Image (spheres, helix red, strand yellow):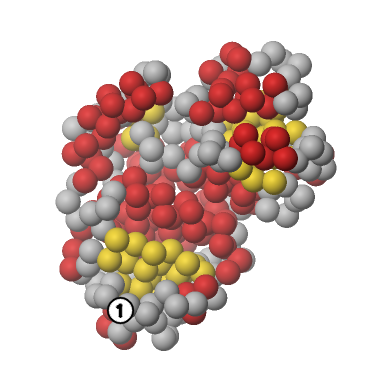
Amino acid sequence: MQNSNIATLNTFDIHSLPDLDTVVLGALEMLEGRDLPLIDINRYKHPLVVGSGNAEATGRIIFDKTNAVFASESTIDAKLASIGDIDEVVIVSASGGKHAPIIAKKALQAGKHVTLITNTPGSLTEKVLSSSELSVHVFPKNREPYTYNTSTYMSMILGYTREDPSQIKRFILEHTAMLALPDLARYSRFYLIVPPEFSGIIRMLQVKFIELFGRNIARDVETSEYVKHATTVAPSDELFIAFGVPNEIWGKPDMRLNIGLPANANYGAMMAVGYYVIAQIQKAHPPYFKDHIVEYCRYISSVFNEDIEPIVAAN
């Protein structure tokens, strides 16, 4: 069935949360044939691009080739105070909530116009600024478990790279899914190596490990160039997973896993393949995320004073 993964995403409940690979394939199915918003990043001369976690990483990917300054919720105040020629504050936020409306208010107080890149129409950020103070780009998203944020940021990245999601999906099903994987349950430590041209994906892969495993599974993610800089002084029984370029030197020969990427891959393919592989680690280990996401959402709702549900609706 062509859209079988979307069918799963439309029907799961809190007792049948999908693994990350289903969400990856469902995102690609949803994005096939979709007209995504086209953001004219060249209209900004010196934007301040702000986001939290994977939103910050997505902003860095989209605006990497511009004269942008990047910030998170932790550094926004210092950047606004010290860089006077910022001509726009661009907020990347799937929900348009949590820190996003706070950042928008700070930008307004600094006299800056705001662009919001989001997956949520009518978000809290839209409610704190007027239409003259805010421009909004809304990207599509699937129904997903909270924090998976796969269709959300993948749609933004594909809106920028213009990669074909059907080709990425075909590559995963015909190549990545066909690989003979080692027993991933044997490992509690993983070292992911990505090509230098995809250095912007490092934070996204790190965050996905944090969300799914917390500190129960150790991970490093670096480029094939940075790995050379004293990152393996203290050896451990970790599985080295290299994307794109085969790893022939790091780790013991029987502790190396090489994952191919499509020809002419861009960030969309790197994200999809990377998340798909992390999903195989998720499936081989205890369900840390699934066992705790309901309790976490109750707690984090009180932290942000927002109603945050463990299942996020599609738009």
Say which quadrant the N terminus sits in: top left
Q: Eyeballing the image, is 108 above or below 205?
A: above
The residue under the point 41% across, 86% down is: 249
Viewer-side residue, 251 vs 15: 251
Q: Residue at x 61, y 42 (%)?
A: 71
Q: What is the count of numbered marks?
A: 1
In the image, what residue occupies the spot 27% across and 53% down?
Answer: 215
**Picture coordinates of residue 270, whole percent (x, y):** 51, 59
In front of the other: 290 or 299: 299
Q: Closer to the camera, 45 or 314?
A: 45
Question: Could one spot residue 21 in this view of the protein?
Answer: no
Percent x, y of residue 161: 65, 51
Secondary element at image label 1: loop
Density class for disc 1 (Cα within 10 Å; few <14, some 14-19, many ≥20) is: few
Q: Do we see residue 24 in this rendering? A: yes
Residue 221 image offset from top left, x and y in percent: 43, 64
**In this picture, residue 296 sits left or right of residue 28:** left
Q: Is residue 57 above or below residue 222?
A: above
Residue 192 appears in which quarter of the rendering?
bottom left
Question: Where residue 186 sits in the image (x, y, percent)?
Answer: 18, 68
> Who is closer to the viewer here, 108 or 209?
108
Q: Which residue is mark 1?
A: 235
**152 over 19 or under it: above or below:** above
Seen at 26% across and 58% down, the residue is 217
Residue type at mark 1 is: Pro
